[in-house]
Image (tube, helix red, strand yellow):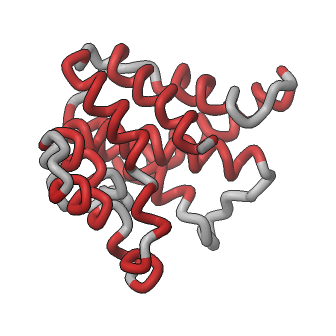
Amino acid sequence: YEKTDRLLTLVNYLVKQTKEEHLTDPLQKAAMYCKNDLVTRMVREFPSLQGIMGGLYLKEAGAEENVWKAVYGHYEPKGYVKVRLEDLGAGLLSIADKIDNITGFISQDIKISSSKDPYGIRRDASAIIKVITEFKLGFDLKALIHLAAGHFVSDSGAHEALVKTAVDLFLSRVENIFK
């Protein structure tokens, strides 16, 4: 429930900042439903189907196309890969989900090292950059990081440290991508 609540806040921010207001209602619904498939036997048996099954279940239940497609594709991309994203709603939900993961891990003092990335933190940061560049999105990433960080820390010093760590992560990822 807490993850869903955070995703709602983040997608609302992204919709406003990217001026994609027509996606407000569909992305709110998608944020509410996107983690439901995690409790199914299908996803427990085949974890690679996370999101995909949720989207397909919603499609079969008669959900609007832009809702089920957002859920279906929100785990993509997995890093800065050559796969072309098709759905802007899935991209925005993906950014919200991944920035929530990144700030959550950093808030727990999980270190991001160049040799290890067991939680996929660097991969998630690269994926966010991929979505931003792919859809030519214009919004303040640092402000999004501030918003996401506020969900995990309330102390201003800890908040600023978390934001700085996340911003540094994105800067290193951008540098790596452009190399």
The residue under the point 57% across, 30% down is 145
Question: At which x and y percent is residue 79?
Answer: 38, 59
- Relative placement, left or right, of 157 versus 146 is right
Viewer-closest of 136 and 105: 105
Res 171 visible = no
Q: Between residue 104 and residue 9, name the one nearer to us.
A: 9
Residue 133 drawn above or below residue 55: above
Residue occupying the point 16% across, 43% down: 87
Q: In what quadrant of the picture does the N terminus appear?
A: top right
Residue furthest toward the front? 61
Can you say whether 82 is above or below 31 in the image? below
**Quarter occupied by residue 134:** top left
- From what the image shows, is residue 174 above or below residue 51? above
Residue 148 in view (yes/no): yes
Residue 68 x %, y %: 22, 48
Q: Nearer the viewer, residue 5 or 167?
A: 5
Q: Residue, x 76% and y 26% (percent of image)?
A: 160
- The structure residue drawn at horizontal position 42% and vertical position 40%, both measured from the top left corner, is 32
Residue 19 coordinates in the image, percent (x, y): 26, 14
* Residue 78 location (% of width, % of height): 36, 62
